[in-house]
Amino acid sequence: MPHEPQPRPTACLALADGTLIYGRGFGAAGQVVAELCFNTAMTGYQEIMTDPSYAGQVVTFTFPHIGNTGTNDEDDETADPVAAGMVVKWDPTEPSSWRSTQTLQDWLARHGRIAIGGVDTRRLTRAIRQQGAPHVALAHDPDGNFDTGALIAAASGFAGLEGLDLARDVTCAQSYRWDEMRWAWPDGYPRQTNARHKVVAIDYGAKRNILRCLASAGCDVTVLPATATAEEVLAHKPDGVFLSNGPGDPAATGAYAVPVIQDLLNADLPIFGICLGHQMLALALGARTVKMSHGHHGANHPVKDYTTGKVEITSMNHGFAVDGQSLPDGVEETHVSLFDGSNCGIALKDRPVFSVQHHPEASPGPHDSFYLFERFSTFMDQKTPVS
């Protein structure tokens, strides 16, 4: 029997080394240039695409069934998707969730994000693990017309994330208050009405669920832009300061953020950092950060907490890491990855200042790491508020 003609590819992923991967495009039409990473989580694709830490990256999802629960307005971690695009194995099916209000395809198109399906994501993931995160150009054209030479050139010309300050691009434009707590059945997100502590959160790309966890831990949260000065932070008379997650090179963002963090350390306040906030706290204390080969992205990363001896299953999303060998005297390593031994947490030995690389708000354990927010709250309980 004659073979039926194969449909023309409508999407192309071009790697800087000249590799071309064709598939079926969905979401918005157009072209984007970024770093390619992979994420091993089986759920949470909407939260991943709206996580500001993914700015400048196209995400390959290793789990094949992406889009099968649709999208909704409650699961966004920020107002709009931040990841540049997505790569999946199977085309998204019709949603089968009572919470869905829109298909993944329509959601991506509405927000101007490009996706490619029909890709051997396991093979692509192996290549990323072996060769490092490549620079790519992702194009979607419903007519299937691609200038492959131009796509390869665009991928080759991408400068990469090293030396790139992306926090300015994703931070809030002005300060705001946050009182929404973690989701609870059956009423959704309750409001914090009996806060015990005033916390200033510096937004380098903060996820909403981190702010919810702070509110659930008894915090009255005021969010300030990434470029806020120490004077602006202290003007709110906080009981503690939170340093948020975010994208890009911590050394680049640290050019303006590290001096602020050092001034806040001199103010002797409890300080808690996550992800980029962890990395920049380490820089402020005198340590170094390094670019990882392919980073850690997923919801199944085992981390050992040296302070308790316990192992947590954590969610991670980072392409840079703190060099644990560079930690100065007075700073202890509190958490390490059991995958590769990389640093995942630090603390000052004599002051209530600590941070972690992983995301305790993302519930992969599902509750393994919530104690970190309670630890921050306890530190503020024990500290005399700023007068």
Image (cartoon, grey):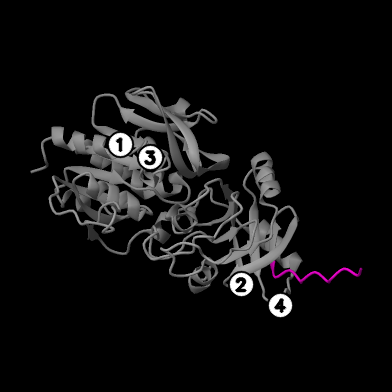
Give how far across and how far down residue 378 sits, in percent: 19, 34
The quarter in which the N terminus is drawn is bottom right
Q: Is residue 363 visible?
A: yes
Closer to the camera in the image, 151 or 54: 54
Q: Magenta span covers which residues?
A: 1-11
Element class at badge 2: strand
Mark 2 to mark 4: distance in Å? 12 Å
Give how far across and how far down residue 103 sits, in percent: 51, 68
Circle on res. 30: 2
3 or 2: tag closer to the N-terminus: 2
| Residue 6 is covered by the magenta coloring | yes
Q: Is residue 230 visible?
A: no
Circle on res. 372: 1
Circle on res. 278: 3
Mark 3 to mark 4: distance in Å? 45 Å
Mark 3 to mark 1: distance in Å? 13 Å
Circle on res. 143: 4
Please, what is the three-letter code of the amino acid marked with disc 2?
Gly
2 or 4: tag closer to the N-terminus: 2
